[in-house]
Amino acid sequence: MRITPTYTVHLLCANGHRTTTELLHAVITPDGMIEGAAGSDADFCAVCNASPLTVLGINEETPLCQWVALCENDATLTRSHPILGEVPICERCNARCESLQDA
């Protein structure tokens, strides 16, 4: 299964605190804008409870491969693990798993 990236919203409160929250149900519109619902912690500052918050930007984040503990590649797929269930995996680790299954 292909991995979809997550989006993190960077926020600034009136008192200067920088916080982040995940953009839920993110959809990229045809004009290139990102729409979605920010988490409930986007309504007030997580540090001082001030509101409203200013959006500084949105970052696209791809999860890292979690198939091998020391792998630091971006995950592009998920693979069924016998104990953990669906796990994010990179192309290199996935190819190694495929070659081990063929042996």
Image: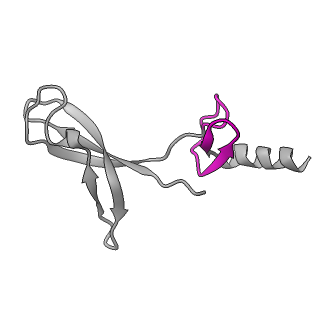
For residue 19, side relative to residue 2 (left or right): left
- Of all residues, the one furthest to the top in this rendering is 47
Side of 76 where 47 appears, left or right: left
x and y, in percent, of residue 14 in the image: 7, 35
**Residue 77 is a magenta residue:** yes
Residue 55 x/y as whole percent:
19, 46
Examine the image and state in which quarter residue 30 appears. bottom left
In the image, what residue occupies the spot 54% across and 53% down?
Answer: 3
x 36%, y 64%: residue: 28
Total number of numbered discs in the rendering: 0
For this orientation, the residue located farthest to the bottom is 30
In the image, the segment drawn in magenta is 66-87
Q: Which residue is drawn at 65% across and 37% down?
A: 67
Q: In this view, does 60 lie above or below 35?
A: above
Q: Main secondary structure of the magenta part?
A: loop
Name the foreground residue: 20 vs 1.
1
Q: Which of 54 and 77 is in front in this view?
A: 77
Q: How is the image coloured?
A: one colour
Quadrant position of the N terminus in the picture: bottom right
Name which quarter of the figure residue 65 lies in: top right
- Give left or right: position of 1 versus 59: right
Magenta stretch: includes residue 73: yes
Above or below 50: residue 76: below
